[in-house]
Amino acid sequence: MRTEALVKTLSEDLKPVRPRSFRRDAVILGVVAILEFAAFAGAGFMRPDLSHAMHMPSFWWKLASMGAIAISGAAVALFSSDPTKSPKAGLRWLAIAVALIFASGWLIDALEGGFSELVRRLDWQMGLQCTWKMVTLSVPLVVALGVLIQRGAPTDRFGTSLAAALGSAGWGAFIFVFACPSDDVLYIAVWYSVGCAIVTVIGRLILARLVRW
């Protein structure tokens, strides 16, 4: 078979692929996030003393921190879905930001009042409840990012998956801020770290399997 005929045969069933657009993917992700937040608020999960909590520095600290992680992680994941871009630089900055965010929480009055006071402040029973709620709230964004990066062609599937998982973890924690019953910075630093770590590890393992080689 001549080369021209072979090429024609192989290309007969091909269909044009819609070019990827970071802006379009970001809009889709934003819509998913807004819908989840609206459903969360509409279901009545907001903390009853939200207006009071909004006057506390710790509330804005955790809201801004989790929002920054969510946006940064999602942005790195979407950018690196392009085969010409690598997530490594973005992941390095993300790692530094996450370390600084949670370290600042750990360092604020960590042992004030002694060990018994530390245990009381950490309140492990409530902490475990908060953790699984954060994990659950991260699921919609994990799914959305999984679909978006699967449509792309990232060259570093593990890095892209890690960024997506971290962004999803940050988003789940961001939403949970509006229902979180505690404003203790130490409690937040510990349990939000645990929740985000669980989502990041599990999400990375799952998403890495979805990314095309």
Image: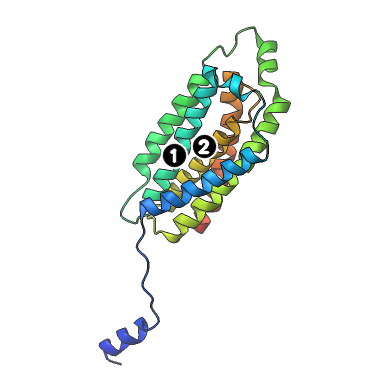
Q: Pointer 1: what residue?
A: 71
The front one of 152 and 40 is 40
* Contact (Cβ within 8 Å) of mark 1 with mark 2: yes
Mark drawn on residue 194: none
36 versus 184 height, above or below: below
118 versus 134 height, above or below: above
Badge 2 amino acid? Gly
Q: Quadrant of the C terminus?
A: bottom left
Assess disc 2: are there few (<14), some (14-19) or many (≥20) residues with their C-alpha within 10 Å of its C-alpha.
Answer: many
Q: How many marks?
A: 2
Q: Position of residue 118 (x, y in %)?
A: 65, 14
Left or right of 187, for residue 159: left
14 versus 45 height, above or below: below
Instruction: Label 1: state its secondary structure.
Output: helix
- Asked if one can make out residue 82 in the rendered structure from this viewpoint, the answer is yes
Mark drawn on residue 170: 2
- The disc, 1 or 2, on the residue closer to the chain's N-terminal end is 1
Left or right of 52, for residue 19: left
- Asked if one can make out residue 213 in the rendered structure from this viewpoint, the answer is no
Q: Position of residue 161 (x, y in %)?
A: 47, 49
Cα distance in 3D space between marks 1 and 2: 8 Å
Q: Quadrant of the N terminus?
A: bottom left
190 versus 110 height, above or below: below
Badge 1 amino acid? Ile
Instruction: Label 2: state its secondary structure.
Output: helix
**Residue name at image x 68 percent, y 11 percent:** 117
Q: Position of residue 140 (x, y in %)?
A: 57, 48
Left or right of 71, for residue 47: right
The front one of 204 and 123 is 123
